[in-house]
Image (cartoon, helix red, strand yellow):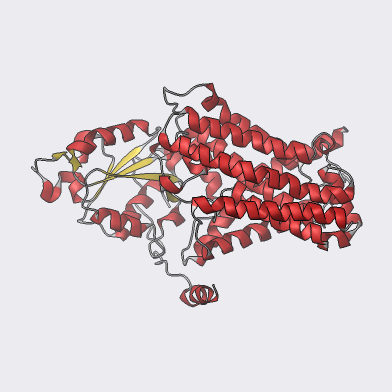
Amino acid sequence: MSATGIAVAMLQVVLTIAAAPLLVGMMRLVRARLEGRVGAPIRQPWRDLRKLLRKERMVSANTGWVFSIAPLVLLASAALVAGIVPFLSTRSALDQVGDLFAVVYLLLLGTVFLSLAGLDAGTAFGGMGASREMTIAAIAEPTVLVAIFALSVSTGSSNLGAIVAATLAHPSTAASPESLLAFAALAVVTIAETGRIPVDNPATHLELTMIHEAMILEYSGPDLAMVELAAHLRLVVFLGLLANLFVPWGIATTVQPLHLAAAAAAVAIKLVALAATIAAIEVFIAKVRLFRVPELLAASFVLAFLAVTASFFLA
Amino acid sequence: MLKLLRKIVRTGRVTETIPHGAGPQPFLGAPDPLRGSLQVRQVDAGSCNGCEAEFAAAFGPVYDAERFGVRLVASPRHADALVVTGPVTRNMAEPLMKAWEATPGPKLVIALGDCARDCGVFAGGYGVAGSVADVVPVDLEILGCPPAPADIVAALRRIVGS
């Protein structure tokens, strides 16, 4: 683990944190424009976070320690994953210790803590949101594992940097059947895990339809700012994984500043394109009924499973 | 889907533009952190739903209060301002008080509509506990029965200052 490698990982975390709220603001703006509205400026999520940091922190008398540390665990795990995932360079320092399994379970750690926090306050909607989140996570997490595993079979390594480097070395594998199947599976899971339509609606204020929002109803002030920032970070992490695992071109294979700057520009373009596509599609579709979400996720699991099968038989 | 896309392209932007230089007169009681970002929780304390309809319209495509950084939220814990409508009925006096206590500071209470100000036609009714100001401290009043969405947006802009 070299000093430059650690510097790259730190740079990646800082850039992701700076960019994540802007990406969410961009998605809201795309949606607003398609709805015929003017919409809030792109920097609005940053303004909201700054405002929340200056507000009072209120904790209900019925909550325990889980409620207090959940935002910290959620934000820390999301920030760590943002450092591990190969966004800028395939030679990130944390990449040596954190591979596919570490990334998936770090993300799951945050999900579990947020669900526990939802239960902790003892409100009806918190418990409901936690139960829904766990239902979705139970199907979505294996899908992420299996989908990325399909890519790692041909590479022979579960290291994310190695997978990206292998795709760079053999560009034809990006269009192979297992890669396309895994992409489809991971795309569905990305939407489910980041709480977008058709699984969850990030703009809802109807408690009965909520999943993510229902768990965080009790958070206020700086705690809420941490939860929101972590949610933005997770969106960027998932979209970044989707972009760089399947379309890795532009990522730096060295740690030279010039290459890193080019890689940052490339990943920014990919993220903006993906996020704008998701935001535009959301305008056209409605949220599916909660009981049909498992069907959607089961379908994505089947796609991931087929991807693994294909990677063994077609390789 | 193609039909909807055609409609989107044909309709274009429907938001009413606000004349240049018609900036809001800043509301001096607005706490500094709320400049540029205001999360609103709406509390119906016994309204006839006329104010709700107009309030919802203020966040629709035509008036688009969201462009000024105002957003509706689901929980008083997330809110900076409570928008209270209607005369406060006996059954809603305690929930309104609880919602106000659950809102983290700095916070504002906006009384929306004539009923919230002086109970309107419901004044003296057997189920009415009083106006909003009798239950929680009111910072800003928006008058009208119901208030026009443009007036609601103008009042919200006084708080966010844009």
Q: Where is residue A195 in the image (x, y as percent from the top left)?
A: 56, 48
Residue A288 visible: yes
Q: Is residue B110 left or right of residue A74?
A: left
Q: In the picture shown, does residue A178 fall above or below B1?
A: above
Q: Position of residue A155 (x, y in %)?
A: 88, 49
Residue at image location 37% in from the left, 32% down from the top:
B102
Camera-side residue of B88 and A173 = A173
Camera-side residue of A99 and A131 = A131
Camera-side residue of A113 and B123 = A113
Q: In the picture shown, does residue A71 fall above or below A242?
A: above
Q: Is residue A171 left or right of residue B61?
A: right
Camera-side residue of A189 and A73 = A189
Q: Position of residue A105 (x, y in %)?
A: 70, 36
Q: In this view, does B31 lie to the left or right of B133?
A: right
Residue at image location 52% in from the left, 50% down from the top:
A44
**The N terminus of chain A is located in which quarter?**
top right
**The C terminus of chain A is located in which quarter?**
bottom right
Q: Where is residue A119 in the image (x, y as percent from the top left)?
A: 49, 31
Q: Quadrant of residue B17 in the image?
A: bottom left
Q: Quadrant of residue B117 in the image?
A: top left
Residue A87 visible: no
Q: In the picture shown, does residue A175 fall above or below B137?
A: below
